[in-house]
Amino acid sequence: MTDIQYFQSYCIGSEITLTGKHKRQLVSCFEKPIQTSEAVLGGRAAVWTIRLDDIGPAVVKNYTRGGVIRNFNRNTYLKFSRYRCQSEYELLLFLDRLGVSVPKPIAFAYQGKFFYHAWLVTREIENAQTLAEFSRQNPDTARTVMHELSRQLTILLENQIHHVDLHPGNVLVDNENKLFIIDFDKARTTPQNRHKLQEKYIRRWQRAVLKYKLPAALNNIIK
């Protein structure tokens, strides 16, 4: 069961027992200046890595905005129903139980009530790179990895889960060629039938492959 505790000016939720030292370590990340990824299709979230005592390497994601709005509102959100960090945290727990390869969630945190900043903490996938980067360096192995991605997406389709920004930058591959789907922010269940949802996945994915001139082997997203 998720326990939400107040620490300094933050609310931190987790199913793991977090010590005062863990919380201080996390807050030190929350208060760092925003920095974004420069990787191919790296996304707009600001991320830091940290080693939490007795837990291990972790990634802290600061939710940030994209587009024009980021010029005057970088990382403040208005709460309508649920905090987006909590929604993604709980979805990752659910997906892990379904057998989808996702980063193991450790905690979520927010600061503020109606206008808030948000963070998500997950276990680090060590020695990993995006599928976009991996496919350029290992085009032949990428074909094998795509078979596993297809299996993972079948689980999402069967459970009517729409990852709204699925592209090769939101799939990581570690040094054992195991893949992980990341960035389920704004993901949701949808009443759409499987065929329509599958078409959305294929269109979004293939648009990214074409735009970034990635190997054609990545086009076969669903078998």
Image (spheres, rainbow, N blue to C red):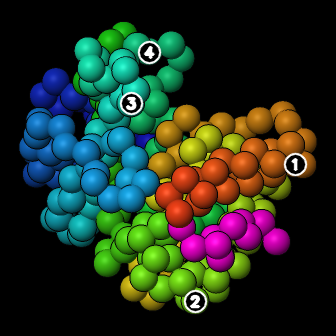
Q: Looking at this rendering, what residue extends furthest in the top direction?
A: 114
Whether label 3 touches label 2, CB < 8 Å: no
Q: Which residue is mark 1?
A: 194
Horizontal and vertical percent position of residue 5: 28, 33
Q: Which residue is pictured at 45% across the width and 35% down the height?
A: 86
Q: Quick one: label 4 or label 2, which is nearer the N terminus?
A: 4
In space, the residues marked 3 and 2 are separated at their CA atoms by: 33 Å
Q: CA distance from mark 4 to mark 1?
A: 30 Å
Q: Position of residue 153 (x, y in %)?
A: 71, 61
Whether residue 105 can be seen here: no
Is tag 3's residue or tag 2's residue first in the polypeptide sequence? 3
Pick whichever of labels 1 and 3 is earlier in the sequence. 3
- Observer-side mark, 3 or 2, equals 2
Q: Which residue is mark 3?
A: 66
Mark 4 → mark 3, Cα distance in angstroms: 18 Å
Q: Quadrant of the C terminus?
A: bottom right
Disc 2 versus disc 1: distance between alpha carbons? 30 Å
Query: Which residue is nearer to you in this view: 174 or 134?
Result: 134
Q: Amino acid at mark 3?
A: Gly
Left or right: 151 in relation to 139: right
Q: Residues within 10 Å of mark 3 (few under 14, many from 20)?
A: few
Where is residue 167 shown, x and y percent of the image? Answer: 56, 55
Query: What amino acid is labelled 1 in the image?
Result: Arg
Q: Are marks 4 and 1 in contact (CB under 8 Å)?
A: no
- Is 111 a magenta residue? no
Rendered position, 161 above or below 51: above
Q: Quadrant of residue 8?
A: top left
